[in-house]
Image (spheres, rainbow, N blue to C red):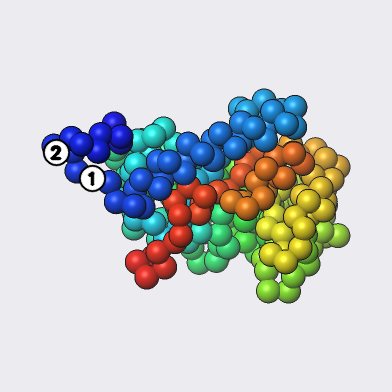
Amino acid sequence: MAGCMGNMETTPMSNHEAKGAAGLKLVREQIRKACAAAGREEQEVTLVAVSKTHGADVIRPVLDAGQRVFGENRVQEAQAKWPALREDYPDVKLHLIGPLQTNKARQAVALFDVIHTVDRPKLAHVLAKEMDRQGRHLPVFIQVNTGEEPQKAGVAPQDADAFIAQCRTEHGLDVIGLMCIPPVNEEPAPHFALLEKIALRNGLDKLSMGMSGDFDTAIRLGATHVRVGSAIFGGRDYASG
């Protein structure tokens, strides 16, 4: 398919397109190895291919290679490209992995299948109302700010138990797991271990943690969803995003 360099009837793939297909294959192999090393089954880990800032022409080769779970950071950007892509690939599952403003909740509930970034009571309330209104009760992850970074979204670790309970009982959200983004200048393993500890005591078995540079560590520490972008697609094109 993609390897017919000498076929004059085949339109050559761009560097980004070739990177996407090859990157996906490499990441899948790394996930297999990480699962084997951790004594886990490969199917326990969902690869969320992070396609933020990449256009449909870059995403399509990854879809054609069989990837069906994708992550986007921004509602507006996802709205611009995914409805058309889903006409050709109707079995795609789209995950919102970036911060969500309450005024975008309606669009988010309509477009996405899973939300990873529930992090405050007001957002939980608005999402619950919107899900009831649309009849789309999406599974959600609670985002925990494991590094307690003031500039980063997420509930503080010491407040996580109470917030999880509130989301479940007061708002009726389908909380399936926890999500974190460790500080960039710190070893990620302690943050992943902390997230797993909070999840276990709250009866949650899904952990959205690990990105291109550390997903092998995340898998070793129990990740069920790894969010991988640059290792698949290469550098992001912020000019077009």
Element type at mark 2? loop
Tell me the amino acid under the disc marked 2.
Met
Q: Position of residue 22 (x, y in %)?
A: 43, 41
Residue at 52% in and 50% down: 231
Q: Residue furthest bottom?
A: 150
Residue 182 lies in quadrant? bottom right
Q: Position of residue 36 (x, y in %)?
A: 69, 28
The residue that mark 2 highlights is: 8
Residue at 75% in and 32% down: 38
Identify the image quadrant of the C terminus. Answer: bottom left
Disc 2/disc 1 C-alpha distance (Å)? 9 Å
Residue at 67% in and 43% down: 216
Q: Position of residue 21 (x, y in %)?
A: 40, 41
Element type at mark 1? loop
Q: Residues within 10 Å of mark 1 (few under 14, many from 20)?
A: some
Between 201 and 3, which is closer to the camera in this rendering?
Answer: 3
Between 119 and 52, which is closer to the camera in this rendering?
Answer: 52
Tell me the amino acid under the disc marked 1.
Pro
Relative to 130, does residue 60 appear above or below in the rendering? Answer: above
The residue that mark 1 highlights is: 12
Q: Position of residue 51 (x, y in %)?
A: 45, 52
Q: Is residue 12 left or right of residue 45?
A: left
Using the rendered image of the protein, determine whether residue 1 is visible from the camera's viewpoint. Answer: yes
Between 51 and 103, which is closer to the camera in this rendering?
Answer: 51
